[in-house]
Amino acid sequence: MAGDTLTAWLKRFVPEPMAMSHGERVRAGLGIVIGLGLTGVVCSLWTGNVLTAPLLIAPMGASAILMFAVPASPLAQPWSVVGGHLVSAVVGVTAAQWLHPPLAAAAIAVMAAMLAMSALRCLHPPSGAIAMIAVLGGPKILATGYGFVLVPVLLNSLVLTAAALVYNNLTGRSYPHQAHPQPAKPVVVLAHDDLAAALSAYGEALDISRADLDALFQDLTLRAKSHK
C-alpha cells in the first residue's frame, strides 16, 4: 500500500514524457542551433560592436525550445513570441524606472507582464525573464532605458521568429500553426460554446488550442469506433 502511494505521488512530479520521436528531436535541435545562431549573427552585424551591446539575451534560448520543439503550442506562435517579449520589455523597463527596491520591482514587473500578455493574447513564458532582466540586468541594461525594448529584445524576437517561420515550414511543420484538418463527416459535432464551457469547467489552462483539441477528439472517436 505504501509503495503504491509513493508511486502515485511520484507520478505527479515525474509525468509521462511528451511524445517526440528521435527524428523530431533531431529536427528541433537543428532548428534551435540555426535559429539562435542566425539571431546572434544578425544582431552582431546590426549593432556592429560585440563588446558593448547585449546581442543575444538568455530568454531567447527558452523561446527557441518552444518555437522549434513544440511549434504547435499556442505559447510558441509568432504573436506570442514577438508580442510577449515586446510587452514584457516595456513593462520591465517601466518598473525599473519607477519602482524600488529592485527585487520588489522585478517581481511586480513579471506579474504585470503576465497580466498584460494575457490581456493581449500573447502569453509567452520566456518573456517573464525579459521583464526581470530589464530590472535586474545590471548597469548596462538600465542605462539603455527603453532602447532595451528595441535592441536587443525586438530585434532578437523578429530574427528568431523569422528563422522559425522558414525552418518549421521547410521541415513540414505549419508555423504559424494550423490545426490538423477534421474528417469530412465528424463523428460528433462539437459546438464552440460547448468546447469553451468544458475547458472553463476543467479549471486549468491547457497548452493546446481549441481547434487542435477538437481535431484530436474527432480522431480519437474515429479510432475508438474502428475497434468496435
Image (cartoon, rainbow, N blue to C red):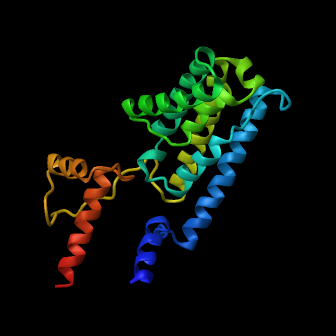
Q: Position of residue 76 (x, y in %)?
A: 48, 46
What residue lies at 49% left-to-right and 59% top-to-bottom? 172
Q: Is residue 104 left or right of residue 70?
A: right
Q: Position of residue 101 (x, y in %)?
A: 63, 22
Q: Position of residue 124 (x, y in %)?
A: 49, 41
Q: Quadrant of residue 11?
A: bottom left
Q: Looking at the image, which is closer to me, 32 or 184?
A: 32
Q: Is residue 16 visible?
A: no
What residue lies at 54% left-to-right and 28% top-to-bottom? 109
Q: Is residue 118 left or right of residue 26?
A: left
Q: Position of residue 150 (x, y in %)?
A: 63, 23
Task: Please state, as top left, top right, bottom left or bottom right, where the N terminus lies in the image.
Answer: bottom left
Q: Is residue 10 visible?
A: yes
Q: Is residue 86 left or right of residue 217?
A: right
What residue lies at 64% left-to-right and 53% top-to-bottom? 32
What residue lies at 48% left-to-right and 65% top-to-bottom? 13
Residue that extends furthest to the front in the rendered view of this protein:
2
